[in-house]
Image (spheres, rainbow, N blue to C red):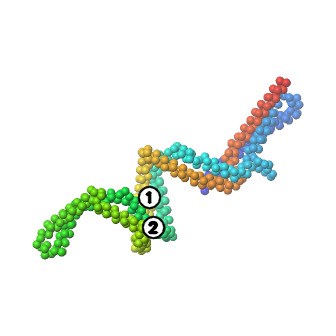
Amino acid sequence: KTSRSTVKVVDMDKALQLSRAKRQAGLWLLGAAGLFICISVWQTLQPSLSNHTALGLIKMMAEAALVGGLADWFAVSALFRPIPAFKPIPHTNIVARNQRTIAANLAEFVKEKFFHEQAIESLVARSSPAKAMGLWLSQSNNAARLAHYVADSLTGLLNVIDDTPIQQALRRSVDRGLRKIPMAALLAGSLRVMTRDNRHQQLVDKLIDKLAGALQSEETQALIADKLNIWLKTEYRRLEKILPSGWLSEQGAAIAVSAVSHTLQDINNDPAHPVRQALNEQISRFIDGLETDPVAQQKLEDFRNRLLESEALHNYLQRIWQDIHQWLSDDLANADGQVVKRLSRLFSDTGARLLADKDLQAAVNHHIGVAARYIAPELAGFLTDHIRRTIESWDATDMARQIELNIGKDLQKVRINGTLVGGLIGGVLFTIEYAISQLV
């Protein structure tokens, strides 16, 4: 309502300015007409003044000004209304009659002048959006405002997801999507990527280091010794009473740890160790089986389907989602919640990094430019089509009125200029005519 009332006030102001400009142009025209009529009547009443040079000059200037003013009045008026209204002559009411042409030309002008690649590149280079973004985000109130906006959007999204029909539709869509995934092909492809160029051996090295370190710790050796001691007491009760089982268990644990540690060290130091080769063969065989063995493929599909149909898993995931949903809802409802604080801090830090890092600015500007050039044709098509359809849907008379409200005041200046220029031309022509008559 406020926007509409503002538009009405602006239109009324423009209408008053246009009316004032029309009166001014009309007064100039009436002045020229009055001057012409007065001199003509005076010369008729006073025949002796018919050859008066000064009066002749003024009369001709007034006559030419009247002609120029009337011509420009007709030209300006013909743009916006039919002349005469009851049976217009051709080439009047030009704006309304050319509504479709104006719409198409304006849409094409916007497309060609504002959405071509050079204009987009120039805009990005001139505005440096990354720096502007950094300056804006570095101000704490802006970062907080954006954080609240994102939080409000998340709240709206949660409310949408909380709707029962939407939840059911999402659950069905996810279930259908997961059932269509070829599990064997997905797993085989993932494993091939992970094991390409022996990438997995780096993970094996890390695991061996961790395992060797765990074996050599006192806690692990004590645990092994305790297990050996229990084994001796359980399996060899009588012999255990004679032998120093505690000492034997400790020595056995040390020997076992040493043997395993040396074996792990050999594996770790030798890229061509048989254990590594055996692991590679097993992985390769497993991947080949996933790609070629229908039985293995069906087992994976069955396992996936059992998980999707598991009521216990569904209930577990549902409870987790309810807890997350409740926490998020409560936190987002709080203006000083953790989500808002973390988002605000994240946006502020991002702004500071954008301001401090010139390379980051250049990279962001480059990618914004690439994205803009990519989006520009689609956006241009959408906007230009919207402009064309919108203009074509306007009432032709109202469109002509709106254009006249916006540029009519300046066009009335054209009428005044036409009156003045016509008068000057009349004066020049009279001077030429008088000069010729004097020479002859």
- For the residue labelled by badge 2, is the local secondary structure a helix, a strand or a loop? loop
Relative to residue 231, is residue 268 depicted above or below? above
Residue 73 located left or right of residue 335: right
80 lies above or below 177 = above
* Mark sitting earlier along the chain (2/1): 2
228 or 61: nearer the eye? 228
* Mark linked to residue 384: none
The residue type indicated by label 2 comes to Pro
Is mark 2 in CB contact (under 8 Å) with mark 1? no
Could you tell me residue 67's position as x and y percent?
79, 39
Of all residues shown, which one is farthest toward the left?
242
* 393 or 419, nearer to the observer: 393
Judging by the rendered image, the residue that carries numbered circle 2 is 182
Q: Secondary structure at mark 1?
A: loop
Q: What residue is shown with label 1? A: 335
**Callout 2 crowding tier (Cα within 10 Å): few <14, some 14–19, many ≥20:** few
Q: Residue shown at 41%/69% (left/top)? A: 293
